[in-house]
């Protein structure tokens, strides 16, 4: 059924008014001289009104099309909402069922916990102690890995010191006047290296003493490095004197 749009009633009323005016203009004796002009003007106005009416009717068809489209989308959305409501009802029922099953399972566990025998309690205690011991062993193993890594770093430092000592030994022949002094310094270095190795062994045997020994070894390495600098300075001075 076509809708009775207000703008259509207004257009029909306008056409009726224009037609009435045209009839009055033609029949009036006082306006016979300008009747043709008025008729022509009224005819043009009627044509313009008809054109506007046709244009508005086209817009009405477009609006009706959009309205039908919106109604279709509204129906589709309502169907989707109905489906969602059904799914929510199913989910709510499943949730209630699962909640009921969980409550029953919890009740059964509580009953089983009350019915446990002393032997089972002892077994649980032993199992907890075993788990605790395993955790402690894992932590100890991790600490030992850290100690081993630190020891490996110290061994690398020792190898570097060995290479430095070898270089110093190769230059010892060039320092005839100071060979005894250099020999004593090298012996001291080897004693320091022996002390470092002994400290590493003590570090591996106990993790508690490790921190103290590590500090001591670092200080010893600094002393050795300073001694190496002194020896290198002496060697450089000796070379300079020899070149002169």
Image (spheres, rainbow, N blue to C red):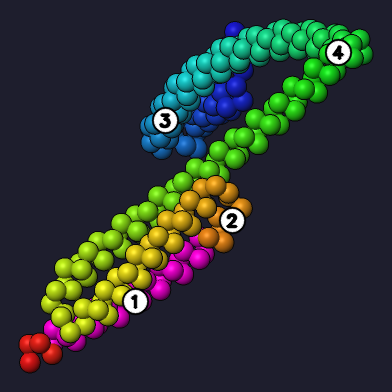
- Residue 41 coordinates in the image, percent (x, y): 40, 35
Q: Chief secondary structure of the magenta span?
A: helix
User: Residue at label 1?
Assistant: 227
Q: Which residue lies furthest to the front in this view?
A: 180
Question: Which structural element holds mark 4?
Answer: helix
Residue that mark 4 sits on: 119
Magenta-highlighted residues:
214-240
* Local SS, label 1: helix
Q: Which mark is first along the chain, 1 or 3?
A: 3
Q: Distance between the residues labelled 4 and 3?
A: 106 Å
| Residue 36 screen position, x and y as percent | 38, 32
Q: Is residue 216 magenta?
A: yes
Quarter of the rendering occupied by the C terminus:
bottom left
Say which label, 3 or 2, has the lower sequence index. 3
Pick whichever, 181 or 163, lies toward us: 181
Separation of disc 2 and disc 4 at Cα? 43 Å
Residue under the image location 31 percent in, 63 percent down: 161
Question: Residue at label 2?
Answer: 209
- Foreground mark, 3 or 1, reads 1
Q: Image height check: is 143 above or below 100? A: below
Residue designated by label 3: 48
Q: Are there few (<14), some (14-19), or many (20+) residues within 10 Å of tag 3?
A: few
């Amino acid at each position: 059924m076509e809708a009775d749009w207000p703008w259509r009633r207004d257009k029909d009323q306008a056409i009726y008014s224009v037609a009435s005016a045209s009839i009055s203009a033609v029949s009036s004796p006082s306006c016979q001289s300008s009747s043709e002009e008025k008729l022509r003007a009224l005819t043009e106005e009627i044509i313009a009104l008809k054109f506007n009416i046709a244009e508005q009717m086209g817009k009405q068809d477009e609006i009706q099309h959009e309205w039908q489209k919106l109604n279709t989308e509204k129906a589709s959305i309502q169907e989707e909402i109905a489906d969602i409501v059904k799914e929510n009802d199913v989910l709510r029922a499943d949730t209630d069922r699962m909640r009921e099953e969980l409550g029953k399972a919890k009740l059964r566990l509580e009953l089983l916990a009350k019915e446990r025998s002393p032997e089972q309690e002892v077994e649980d205690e032993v199992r907890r102690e075993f788990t605790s011991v395993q955790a402690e062993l894992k932590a100890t193993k991790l600490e030992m890995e850290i100690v081993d890594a630190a020891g490996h770093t110290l061994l690398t430092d020792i190898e570097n010191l060995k290479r430095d000592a070898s270089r110093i030994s190769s230059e010892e022949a060039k320092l005839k006047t100071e060979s005894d002094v250099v020999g004593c310094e090298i012996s001291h270095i080897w004693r320091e290296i022996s002390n470092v190795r002994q400290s590493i062994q003590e570090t591996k045997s106990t993790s508690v003493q490790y921190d103290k020994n590590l500090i001591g070894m670092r200080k010893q390495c600094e002393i050795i490095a300073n001694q190496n600098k002194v020896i290198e300075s002496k060697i450089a001075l000796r070379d300079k004197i020899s070149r002169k």
